[in-house]
């Protein structure tokens, strides 16, 4: 039934993490409406959803750039992506 996509454990982990994060954001939005807007280091007024989007977009660029320039292993870009996500939710 799902043979059109190569479902591996890493692929499943990415989707589970993504949908769990979106579920957490829905819960936080119900608990505290308004998206927790703030002006960060980049001078943008962002909400939690904006920061999640910037984190996902930046992380994908980090991984694609690493694969294009360095190849494998992917532990270093994982650390960079976690650092980027921390920066986005803390300072942006």
Image (cartoon, grey):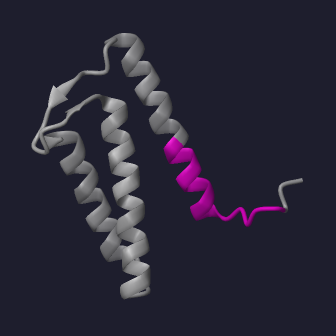
Q: Which residues are magenta?
A: 4-18
Q: Is residue 92 magenta?
A: no
Quarter of the image where one finds residue 80: bottom left
Q: Note whether 74 is above or below 34 in the view shown.
A: below
Q: Note whether 26 is above or below 44 in the view shown.
A: above
Quarter of the image where one finds residue 59: bottom left
Q: Residue at x 50, y 29 (%)?
A: 23
Q: Residue at x 37, y 78 (%)?
A: 66
Outermost residue, right direction? 1
Location of residue 53 in the rendering, given as x and y in whole percent from the top left corner: 39, 43
Location of residue 27 in the rendering, given as x and y in whole percent from the top left corner: 43, 20
Q: Residue at x 38, y 17 (%)?
A: 29
- Which quadrant of the rendered structure holds the C terminus? top left
Q: Is residue 9 magenta?
A: yes
Location of residue 40 in the rendering, given as x and y in whole percent from the top left corner: 12, 37
Location of residue 7 in the rendering, given as x and y in whole percent from the top left corner: 71, 62
Q: Residue at x 42, y 62 (%)?
A: 60
Q: Is residue 20 left or right of residue 66?
A: right
Q: Which of the pair 88/78 is nearer the observer? A: 88
Q: Which of the pair 60/73 is nearer the observer? A: 60
- Mark count: 0
What secondary structure characterizes most of the magenta part? helix
């Amino acid at each position: 039934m799902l043979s059109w996509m190569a479902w591996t454990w890493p692929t499943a982990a990415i989707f589970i993490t993504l949908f769990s994060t979106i579920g957490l954001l829905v819960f936080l939005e119900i608990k505290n409406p308004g998206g927790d807007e703030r002006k960060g280091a980049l001078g943008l007024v962002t909400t939690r959803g904006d920061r999640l989007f910037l984190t996902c977009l930046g992380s994908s660029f980090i991984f694609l750039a690493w694969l294009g320039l360095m190849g494998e292993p992917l532990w270093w870009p994982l650390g960079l992506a976690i650092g980027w996500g921390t920066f986005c939710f803390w300072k942006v």
